[in-house]
Amino acid sequence: MRSMPSVGSSIMVRTQYHGSREYTTRGTVIPRMPWLTPTQFAVATGNPDFPKAVIDISRVVDLKIVSGSAVSVDTSSTRQFRVTSKSTGKSYIVSAIGGQISCTCTGFSYRRTCKHSQAVSKKITHEN
């Protein structure tokens, strides 16, 4: 289980990318942007050069809630599928996390649904 800070929470988060390189981000959690996956959240940093940061909870090393709250997210049930578009031949990653589905295609970022996510949803439903 990982913690996902609630919108409006003031946080300080340490993340690790590219091996051992760590980054610290401070700010306020802002409402979800449509293109974020279920395991990502956005932070308003207050830095004019870098006003927003997107954090993936799988990269979080340490999360301190200065004010506000957090909810637990079960990332152990994460499943990912590579789906190839029939029309373009491009491959996309569809993630299913605790009943929420997201896709890396442009259409999903605008509509919050696409043929790829619908196909995976149907596949998962038929498995159960």
Image: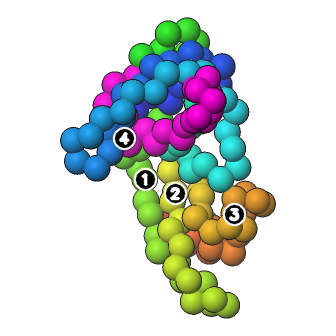
Foreground label between 1 and 3: 3
Looking at the rendered structure, which numbered label has been put on residue 108?
3
Camera-nearest residue between 124 and 57? 57
Of labels 1 and 3, earlier in sequence is 1
The residue singled out by tag 1 in the image is: 78
Foreground label between 4 and 3: 4
Spatial CA distance of label 2 from label 3 is: 14 Å
Query: Which residue is depicted at the point 36% across and 33% down?
Result: 23
**Disc 2 residue type?**
Ala
The residue singled out by tag 4 in the image is: 59
Residue 16 visible (yes or no)? yes
Task: Please state if 10 lies on the left or on the right of 7 as rendered.
Answer: left
Mark 4 and mark 3 residues within 8 Å of each other at the beta carbon: no
Camera-nearest residue between 98 and 52? 52
Question: Relative to 7, does residue 128 appear above or below in the rendering?
Answer: below
Quadrant location of the N terminus?
Answer: top left
Question: Relative to 40, does residue 10 appear above or below in the rendering?
Answer: above
Query: Which residue is depicted at the point 50% across and 30% down?
Result: 4
User: Alpha-carbon neighbours of circle 4 within 10 Å: few (<14), some, or many (≥20)?
Assistant: some
Of labels 2 and 4, earlier in sequence is 4
Q: Which residues are magenta?
A: 44-63
The residue singled out by tag 2 in the image is: 96
